[in-house]
Image (spheres, grey):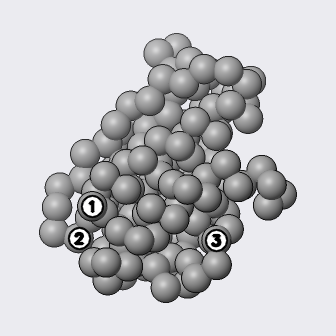
Amino acid sequence: MSHALSRWDDAVASLAQALRAKGWHLATAESCTGGLIAAACTSIAGSSDWFERGFVTYSNEAKTELIGVPKTLLDDHGAVSAEVARAMADGALAAADVDLAVAVTGIAGPGGATPGKPVGTVWMAVAQRGAVTQPVLLQLGGSRSDVREQTVDAALAALLTRAR
C-alpha cells in the first residue's frame, strides 16, 4: 500500500511545508475517494503536525451525521453536487476546528452514473477559515481507480494552492 501512495509524496511534502509555515491544520471529507486523500497525507512522517483528521462520508447518512450536511441538500441536489461538496467542506472545517478542509464527492464508476452526471463526475471544494468556499467540477476519465487517483491529485493541488 505504501508504494501506491508514494506517488503523492512530493505533493504532500510541499503541502506539509506550506501548512507548517502558516501553522495551519487540515481535515478531509471524502466520499468517492474513501479516505485516499487522508491516507496520502498521512503516508509521510510528521503529518500529525498539520493533519488533524479525515472523515470518510461515503453514505448520505454519514455526510449528515458526521459533518452536518443538511438532508434537504442531499434530497434536492443529490450527493454528487456543488451544494453538497460545499457543505461537506464547510462541515469538515467546523467539525474538526481546522484552518483548511477539502471535500470530494463523485461517481468513480463503473456504475452509478445518472442523467447529467456521468462516471468521472466529481465535485470538490476547499474550505478555508474566513473565506468563501467555491466548489469545482472535475470531469475525469478512465477506470474507477483512475478517477479516484485523479481526484486525489486535484485535491492535493487545490490544497497546496490555498495553503501557499
Give the amino acid at mark 2.
Arg
Residue 58 drawn at (x, y percent) = 64, 53
Front residue (pair 71, 8): 8
Q: Which residue is mark 1?
A: 164
Return the residue nearer the eye: 79 or 48.
48
Q: In front: mark 1 or mark 2?
A: 1
Residue 72 in view (yes/no): no
Near mark 2 (Cα within 10 A), the count class, few <14, some 14-19 or many ≥20, is some
* Percent coordinates x, y for residue 60 in the rendering: 57, 52
Give, as a three-letter code, the residue at label 1.
Answer: Arg
Which amino acid type is marked by label 3? Ile
Q: CA distance from mark 1 to mark 3?
A: 19 Å
Query: Residue 44 got which mark?
Result: 3
Q: Categorize mark 1 by other alpha carbons within 10 Å: few (<14), some (14-19), many (20+).
A: few
Residues under labels 1 and 2: Cα distance? 14 Å
User: Which residue is nearer to you in this view: 61 or 26?
Assistant: 26
Is 152 rendered above or below residue 44? above
Q: Earlier in the sequence, mark 2 or mark 3?
A: 3
In this rendering, which labeled residue sits more in front, label 2 or label 3? 3
Between disc 1 and disc 2, whose residue precedes? 2
Q: Position of residue 122 (x, y in %)?
A: 50, 34
Q: Secondary structure at mark 2?
A: loop
Disc with the residue nearer the chain's start (1 vs 3): 3
> Which residue is pictured at 31% across the width and 42% down the height?
135
Report the residue marked by disc 2.
Answer: 129
Q: From this viewpoint, is residue 49 visible?
A: yes
Vertical side of 136 occupied by 25: above or below:
below
Q: Which quadrant, please, contains the N terminus?
A: bottom right
